[in-house]
Amino acid sequence: MKKVLLVTFTYPPDNTPAAERMSKFAKYLPEFGWQPVVLAAQPIGASYKQLASNNDPALIIRVPYRPLLPLRAGAVGREVATAPAGASRGCTDSLLALAAERLGLNVMIREPWMWHRPAILEGARLVKSLDVQCMLTSLKPVSTAFVGAGIHKRTRIPWIAEYRDPWSMSPYMHSRRVRPLRILEQTVEKRLIRGSTRIVSVTQYWTQQLSRFHDKPAVCIPHGYDDTNYETTVSPTECFTITYTGAIYPGKRDPTPLFLALAKLRQEGVIHEGRFKVEFYGPKLQTALSEMITSFGLESLVHVHSEVSFEESLRQQQRATVLLLLSWNDPRDAGTLTSKVFAYLGARRPILAMAWEGGELAAMLRESGYDAIANTPSEIEALLRTWIQEYDTQGAISSGFHPSLERIAQYSRKAQAKRLADLLDECSQLPREA
């Protein structure tokens, strides 16, 4: 069986979209003739519980490294040791983090650079010792691109550079970067990716943009869902429940319009405690939402929970009456297609989406039979009135919810692995550079 090196910063039991995507590629690629060899990071001081992986653990190689800054809370499913007694990095860490945020320097300061050199050496060794035919690197963090470029330089192995998110062209960071740094970052990105054979992105929009930016062939392999992750029988919640799982980005992925609609419906007596609730699960949500919930007087209706495991988040999605999907209602977000939407599709529940009407996310939802896209408080209020009436009279929601199982099936993790295997077959047959 041919071998592919999967270079990813996080991998299960880390609870990140990157870890989930790479582990599903690793799970299904053998069915299409490719044996995965995983190269991932492990911070010094971190320990792992039993690997929740579908692969032979001998083919999962962890590269130890010492983080420059503490890991972000909720970013990984690791048990991280506390700092040694007498350590006084807090002030320095805070200043570095502030500089990264204000100047748009997260890539340069916040990224885990300390792992990339040992990863390059280990990756090159694996390619040669295991006769690996192809390599896939998954960005972000952008240090994986440095790892891929270094391994490629030493081995000339065909290299597929995957972007789950854009790098220098990111609409979330572009406005905060000063122009000289933006130009520098674009130059570095182009030089690094120059050695890649193909580019992969998760949306059609960014596939086209990245192909033009790098002047290279690019392929779209979206995120997906895995049917085997979902329970066959899950008891629904006892009342009309809107559930959200994930992080909140105030001003971008922001529930304020929903809260305005809920405040009005509560005032009119349409919703009340015991018959209606909203559940949020995710990292640092108390900080992001508590004050907002109180200001709208929604404490009895809206509940905030800490981050849960991937498996538990899927279970809560299946139990929900409606799933809340937050995206940025802005044309700059037209090419964003979050991994969360595919988990929601797998749960087969109605989706209330707040997203840019002309974007790829809205188009994909409508093509899949999910037509409940509402961005203003009045639109959300009207939709919830209809849904609550349907729920009370029929016990189920029908408006804006006519899922196309055939369309949704193309987003299965197995189907995505088949697309990647086809690309690996193509790249592995190309002559290696001298």
Image (cartoon, rainbow, N blue to C red):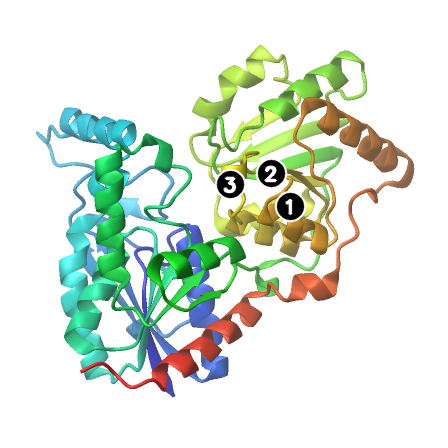
State the residue in front, 269 or 418: 418
Q: Where is residue 64, by image quadrant?
A: bottom left
Query: What label sits on residue 356 in the rendered view?
Result: 2
Image quadrant in which you'd find residue 135: bottom left
Left or right for 245, reference 298: left
* Residue kind at label 3, given as amino acid type: Asp
Please tell me whether mark 2 sits on a helix, a strand or a loop: loop
Q: Residue 99 location in percent, x, y?
A: 22, 28
Residue at 77 percent of width and 27 percent of height: 275
The kind of secondary structure element at disc 3 is: helix
* Mark closest to the chain's N terminus, 2 or 3: 3
* Residue linked to disc 3: 333
List the residue tagged with mark 1: 362
Foreground of the two, 313 or 204: 204
Query: Mark 2 and 1 residues: CB-CB less than 8 Å, in contact?
Result: yes
**Callout 3: few (<14), some (14-19), or many (20+) C-alpha neighbours within 10 Å?**
many
Q: Is residue 211 above or below residue 92?
A: below
Contact, mark 3 vs mark 1 (Cβ under 8 Å): no
Q: Amino acid under label 1?
A: Ala
Task: Please say if the residues under marks 2 and 3 sit with CB atoms less than 8 Å apart.
Answer: yes
